[in-house]
Structures are given as structure tokens and as C-alpha cells.
Amino acid sequence: MTTPGYAEKRYAGVTVLVGAERGAYPYANSVLVRGTSETLVIDPSLSLVGAAPPADLVLVSHAHEDHVAGLGDYEVPAHVHEGDLAALRSRDVMAAGYGLPPDATADTEVILRDQFHVRDRPDAAAFADGTVFDLGGRTVTAVHLPGHTAGHSGFLVEPDGFLYVADIDLTSFGPYYGDLGSSLPDFEASMRRCREIGARWYGTAHQKGVIEGAGDFSARLDAFAAVVKKRDATLLAFLDEPRTVEEITAHRLVYRPHIDGPHVEPVERRTAAQHLRRLISTGLVTEVGEGRFRAA
């Protein structure tokens, strides 16, 4: 896998290191923040491998391979939310967290090692929601935004008014909550929290880049969140007659029919289960027989 480097874009005192292909997976956008006493990097991506800018510490929004591929270039303190600490410390734990079948998990561990340069970071330290990193004249505050992963976090840079929201990435794919540690209710709560934080710029980890202004960000977040409602509607329409979780999984709420791979079935199953729980709790779906569900 090639690492063609990155482009720098400045937003006051914040520099976004735009990854290859506008940060589309397997790449991502990283963030460089300089103060008068220290410099930090957020989410060193694959595009930073072999070209990482100097930094005194690294912050990781969550323990997914596209956000830590460049971490091996840094022999400085690395910090992640306590919810993802075990996965950052151990590549095996990271691979297991995707919830794939055993053979696919073993293959994923190899991909993490060989294509994304992921190695164990037993020295990684945990931060909590609200932890402030003072760089001298500029602060970076951790904002816990779980749902994508248990520890997924954003970072608010002040006084610049730059909020990095990581994988609340505003893409047309919509929110992803298909890992073992993912949570649809938490993801929705995290999106609501993002709306409450007034910022000048909102930085995403992938193609959408940086959005200027709370109004534009809120509109794009509406469209992103609407994908969840679309999945609800798709499921309700499919439940016009009793269906099992296996049937819902095969019908698909997340991936298009042409997408294939060992990740598809487990992600679809976990996503279906979460949507079923919420629709049952609101009375829109009932269990009409053991393991069979129908729209009420």
C-alpha cells in the first residue's frame, strides 16, 4: 500500500494534514496543533508514514487502523480515551474488536500489521472526557463522542474554535456502529452533543474535510443522521410480514448488495439488532413468535 503524503491546510493556529484521496479510507485527515511550548498530532494517518511532522505527543480519536497507521513514526506519549485504550495497546485486541469470524480476525491482524503498520503501544495512556492538553497559548480539550467505538472522541482547539469530530464524518455512507463496542444510542447522543458545541470550524477525518460555521455543519449533520432514520424505514418496510434476524441481516441495512467480504454479515447483524431494539422499545415493532419480528 502506497503512502503518497498529505497536503497542509491552515485554520488559524490549526493545520489539517489532508490525507491522500481527500482522506478517503484507507487514508484519513490528521491534525497538527502547535502551542508556544508543545506540539501535538491528532490521528496520525497512513499518509504520514515516513513523513510525520515532529510532535511532542499524539492524541488518537479512536483505535481504528486508519487513524493510527502513522503512530509508529512517533516515539512520544500517545493518548486515547479509556474506552479504546486496550485496543491501542494491543493489535490483537484491536483486531478482535471488529467482531469478525476467527479466520477473518486472523487475516485482519495481518492487514493491520503489514498494510497499516499497527504495532502494540503498551505505553499508551488514557484520557477522560474533558481532559485538557495545554500546549502554551493553545489548548486541546477531549470531547468524548462514543458510538462509533466506545472511546471515540473529538477534540476542541481553543482559542481557534476548531472542533475535530473524527468519524462523525458527515459522509453519505452515514453513521457506522457495527463493531462489538459500537452503540447506536451513544452515536445519536454524540451527534446531539456536537450540535451543542459552538465552533468556527468542524474538522472531519475523511472526505468532507473542514466545515466552516455552525449552520453549515448542523445542516450536514442533519443529512448524516438521516441515514439512521432511512435504515429504520427500510427495516419497518421489510417487516411487513414476520422476519427473523437472519432474514433482516441478508436484506441489509448498511451495505449495498454488491459489497462482499467477511465483515458484511456480522456488521449487518449487529446493526439490525440495534435497530430492532429501538423499534421494539417505541412500539413500532413486535415479536410475534420466538425470534420473529413484525411491524406493529
Image (cartoon, rainbow, N blue to C red):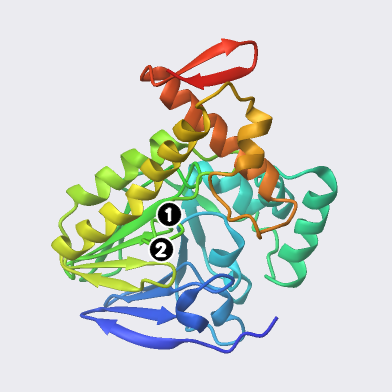
- Name the residue nearer the viewer: 233 or 226: 233
Residue wearing tag 1: 174
Residue 19 place in picture, x, y as percent: 48, 80
Q: What's the residue at 46%, 34% (across, down)? A: 237
Residue wearing tag 2: 171
Do tag 1 and tag 2 residues touch (Cβ < 8 Å)?
yes
- Name the residue nearer the viewer: 24 or 259: 259
Horizontal arrangement in the rendering, residue 194 relative to residue 205 (left or right): left
Residue 273 place in picture, x, y as percent: 56, 30
Real-space CA distance between mark 1 and mark 2, rounded to the nearest whole angstrom: 6 Å
Quadrant in the picture for residue 100: top right
For residue 151, say whether it is visible: yes
Is disc 2 surrounded by few (<14), some (14 to 19) or many (20+) residues within 10 Å?
Answer: some
Above or below: residue 203 compared with residue 254: below
Horizontal arrangement in the rendering, residue 147 relative to residue 96 (left or right): left
Q: What's the residue at 58%, 70% (across, down)? A: 71
Q: Which mark is residue 191?
A: none
Q: What's the residue at 62%, 49% (across, down)? A: 87
Horizontal arrangement in the rendering, residue 214 relative to residue 48 (left or right): left
Q: Residue furthest front?
A: 241
Q: Quadrant of the C terminus?
A: top left
Q: Amino acid at mark 2?
A: Thr
Q: Secondary structure at mark 1?
A: loop
Residue 90 place in picture, x, y as percent: 69, 51
Residue 83 place in picture, x, y as percent: 51, 41
For residue 143, say whether it is visible: no
Q: What's the residue at 80%, 51% (across, down)? A: 104
